[in-house]
């Protein structure tokens, strides 16, 4: 049976991840699981339940440094050795980097097999699991090689979050904060004040964040008409910061810094006023525990950003913000980014 027609799918909150995955076998398909090695060691009962249900489980290293073409080739080899075929389903259990890798592998194996996303981090639950964007990093940039390949199901199991360190949970707030900043000030404030130890509260926050993201995905599932471009807010600068740091900077922290920087760009370009910028910068820095902007070489960062896949020709673009909850421009929401303004925004970001 060929994969179902890809489209954005609402995440399903499940009471147990294993039955959700095993249920994919009900149509007579084989199911194969690739799981983060960290998750498999923390949840041996999940691995046991999957193996008892006749599902082969392949532990895998996650993290940005392992999201490469070489790692993808190794995963392909393991899946072929395990017996995957065109009618199979690949289930990925892990954070955003593993979902990106596994989704891209599924997109290209025998020209496309179905896959299921089971995110295990707050960041992946609010972002990477839904958008259909899969891929790997290369020496030329982050996520620069990939494909659109939507999962046929997304399962959210909140107990995964109980094992996350506090810092990782804060990083996971980045996409929730972003969804509020671009579309809903109330959600933005809820994200800023979220009690990450309250599982039910986090569940409500996730549902609202997913609702906002899905509203853009449905209008522009393959990033063609400009509607989902707004979801890149903070990422033009954020991806550059990640690459410049050698991926030592977490994705969440990089995006939070990127949002603060792109708000500074909005002020420098005249799209927002100083009061809005100052308040947003203060709030974003509070989430990541910083009192000032990153100390980086602006020219080096610009070169990293210039390799980003969102570049058009020689031009870079960013998403200007008018105020919390409101972009400055209509679809496709973007403005050109000039180096002189970029340098000016760096001074705004790091002042005080």
Image: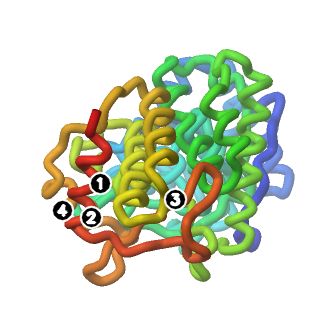
In the displayed structure image, the side of residue 7 where residue 32 appears, left or right: left
Residue 313 is at least partly visible in this image: yes
Q: Mark 2 or mark 4, which is nearer to you?
A: 2
Q: Nearer the viewer, residue 189 or 73?
A: 189
Instruction: Give the CA separation, mark 2 to mark 4.
Output: 15 Å
Q: Percent position (x, y) of residue 243? A: 26, 50
Q: Could you say which disc has been placed on residue 321 in the image?
A: 3
Q: Could you say which disc has been placed on residue 254 in the image?
A: none
Instruction: Give the CA separation, mark 1 to mark 4.
Output: 16 Å
In the displayed structure image, the side of residue 195 where residue 201 appears, left or right: right
Q: Nearer the viewer, residue 138 or 185?
A: 185
* Residue labelled with disc 4: 303
Q: Quadrant of residue 125?
A: top right
Q: Secondary structure at mark 4?
A: helix
* Residue labelled with disc 1: 345
Name above or below for residue 183 compared with residue 14. Answer: below
* Residue labelled with disc 2: 341
Q: Percent position (x, y) of residue 202? A: 72, 28
CB under 8 Å between discs 3 and 2: no
């Amino acid at each position: 049976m060929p994969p179902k027609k890809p489209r954005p799918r609402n995440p399903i909150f499940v009471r147990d991840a294993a039955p959700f995955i095993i249920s994919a076998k009900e149509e007579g398909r084989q199911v194969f699981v690739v799981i983060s090695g960290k998750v498999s060691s923390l949840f041996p009962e999940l691995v046991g339940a999957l193996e008892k249900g006749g599902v082969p489980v392949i532990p895998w290293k996650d993290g940005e440094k392992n999201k490469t073409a070489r790692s993808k080739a190794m995963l392909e080899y393991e899946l072929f050795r395990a017996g995957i075929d065109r009618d199979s389903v690949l289930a990925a259990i892990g954070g955003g980097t593993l979902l990106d890798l596994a989704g891209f592998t599924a997109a290209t194996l025998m020209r496309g097999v179905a896959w299921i996303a089971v995110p295990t981090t707050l960041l992946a639950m609010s972002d990477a699991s839904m958008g259909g964007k899969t891929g790997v990093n290369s020496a030329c940039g982050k996520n620069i090689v990939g494909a659109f390949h939507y999962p046929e199901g997304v399962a959210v199991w909140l107990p995964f979050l109980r094992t996350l360190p506090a810092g990782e949970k804060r990083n996971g707030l980045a996409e929730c904060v972003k969804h509020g900043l671009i579309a809903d000030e109330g959600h933005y404030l809820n994200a800023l004040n979220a009690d990450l130890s309250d599982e039910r509260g986090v569940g409500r926050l996730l549902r609202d964040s997913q609702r906002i993201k899905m509203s853009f995905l449905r209008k522009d599932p393959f990033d063609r008409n400009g509607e989902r471009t707004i979801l890149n807010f903070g990422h033009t600068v954020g991806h550059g910061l990640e690459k410049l740091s050698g991926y030592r900077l977490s994705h969440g922290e990089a995006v939070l810094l990127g949002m603060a920087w792109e708000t500074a760009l909005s002020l420098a370009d005249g799209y927002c006023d100083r009061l809005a910028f100052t308040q947003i910068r203060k709030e974003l820095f509070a989430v990541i525990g910083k009192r000032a902007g990153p100390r980086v070489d602006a020219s080096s960062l610009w070169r990293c950003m210039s390799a980003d896949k969102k570049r058009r020709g020689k031009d870079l673009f960013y998403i200007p913000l008018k105020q919390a909850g409101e972009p400055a421009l209509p679809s496709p929401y973007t403005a050109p980014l000039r180096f002189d303004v970029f340098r000016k925004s760096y001074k705004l970001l790091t002042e005080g």
